[in-house]
Amino acid sequence: MPKADVSETFQLGAMNHVGVAVPDIDIAIAFYRDVLGAIDITEPEVLAPQGVKYAFVNLPTGQVELIEPYGETSPILKFLERNPKGGQHHVCFEVQDIHVAKSVMETRGMRVLGEPRIGAHGTLVVFLHPADAGGVLIELMETH
């Protein structure tokens, strides 16, 4: 029996989170807690290699990742220049194997932004260029 081509068997997993860029993470946390009533919000942490400070709003069906720029080269800075109040930055989907996902996406004509690197969940991630994805920055995250 012939072995299936990995691009034919590749499947996108569950939506993991929506990333929201914010100019001030403490104000954003207060909004989700005090206005929207979220009760499970992680303490902010810094992920210096990605240039962000982040916190997760944990909800019954997923997460909202609040991301604030960290450092002078943070990719979030340009986003906030265009959207000073913040806004939806990316959508994250789980994949079984990040290296297979990267290869399949490249085969399908997607521009993958960089090599797999450790993301806020402590697993490998890559991003797909929004110009190739209907204007949406997509993060692919290797399943825990």
Image (cartoon, grey):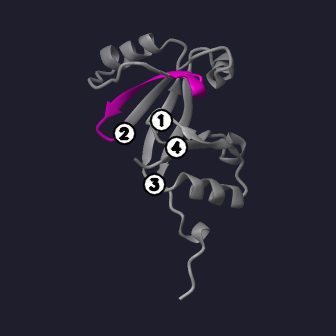
Report the Cα–Cα distance between label 3 and label 4: 15 Å
Residue 52 in percent (x, y) is at 55, 22
Residue 126 in percent (x, y) is at 59, 43
Camera-side residue of 96 and 18: 96
First in sequence: mark 4 vs mark 1: 1
Helix, strand or loop at label 2? It is strand
Q: Are marks 2 and 3 in contact (CB under 8 Å)?
A: no
Q: For mark 3, what is the residue?
A: 13
Report the Cα–Cα distance between label 2 and label 4: 19 Å
Report the Cα–Cα distance between label 2 and label 3: 13 Å
Is residue 65 depicted above or below 3 in this figure?
above
The numbered disc on residue 18 is 1
Q: For mark 4, what is the residue?
A: 124
The secondary structure making up most of the magenta span is strand
First in sequence: mark 3 vs mark 1: 3
Report the Cα–Cα distance between label 2 and label 1: 8 Å
Q: Is residue 25 visible?
A: yes
First in sequence: mark 2 vs mark 4: 2
The numbered disc on residue 62 is 2
First in sequence: mark 2 vs mark 3: 3
Farthest-out residue, left = 39
Residue sitting at x 43%, y 36%: 121
Helix, strand or loop at label 1? It is strand
First in sequence: mark 3 vs mark 4: 3
- Residue type, numbered disc 2: Gly
Q: Are marks 2 and 1 in contact (CB under 8 Å)?
A: yes
Circle 1 packing at 10 Å, graded few (<14), some (14-19), many (20+), is many
Q: Is residue 51 magenta?
A: yes
Query: Magenta segment, which residues?
Result: 47-62
